[in-house]
Image (cartoon, rainbow, N blue to C red):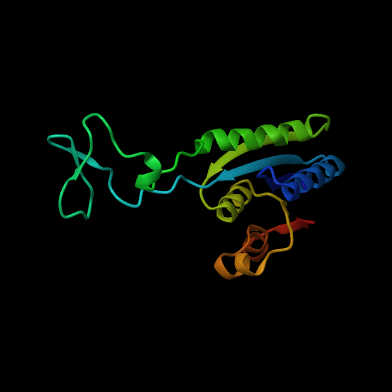
Amino acid sequence: MKEIVVGYDSSEEAGRAVARAAEVADAFSSHLVVVSVTKPAPEPASPPLEAAPSGSMIVPGAAVPIAVPAGDSPPESELGVERSPSTDALAERQLEHARLALADRSVDVEFVSELGDVAERVLDVAQSRQSDLIVVGSREHGFFERLFSTPVDEAVARRAETDVLLVH
């Protein structure tokens, strides 16, 4: 076993997966690749507001400009825009947690940041590196989670072309 890919997102389950992957990597003298995947920031639901002459704003879909006192604009929360940390910063924070968890281990480890669908990106990294094993954390999934999406651990296990270790 030469290459092991493990998905990591700072959750308890991912922490256990990284620990187990490190144990396996140490036992087989394998190269360990820790992959942190963040989802891209969602696209705005509508185009940004445009300033109209004389202190009014044109709201997409509105019949007439809305009056706004000069120099003011509605708060972002009223426009449906929420600030979120940069996806790069989030991935780096997650990878830093993994680095700390592996600091006392003597394994050959590499940290990779990806952007996109979590299961898809972990599978792509594993395939491109011809990994021998994929390790992901697993937990009990609720009814609504199963109803509205496929959990990452299940998606990886179903679609992987290599062995998968689900860590509970």
**Is residue 52 placed above or below 116 in the rendered structure?**
above
Q: Quadrant of residue 69?
A: top left
The quadrant of the rendering that contains the C terminus is bottom right
**Is residue 138 placed above or below 56 in the rendered structure?**
below
Give the side of residue 138 with respect to residue 48, left or right. Answer: right
Q: Position of residue 42 (x, y in %)?
A: 43, 48
Residue positioned 16% across, 46% down in the render? 65
Q: Position of residue 95 (x, y in %)?
A: 65, 35
Number of numbered callouts drawn? 0
Residue positioned 32% across, 39% down in the render? 74
Q: Residue furthest left?
A: 53
Q: Quadrant of residue 161?
A: bottom right
The one nearer the camera, 47 or 163, is 47
The one nearer the camera, 39 or 71, is 71
Give the side of residue 115 with respect to residue 45, left or right. Answer: right
Residue positioned 52% across, 35% down in the render? 88
**Is residue 64 placed above or below 74 in the rendered structure?**
below
Q: Position of residue 32 (x, y in %)?
A: 73, 40
Q: Position of residue 112 (x, y in %)?
A: 61, 38
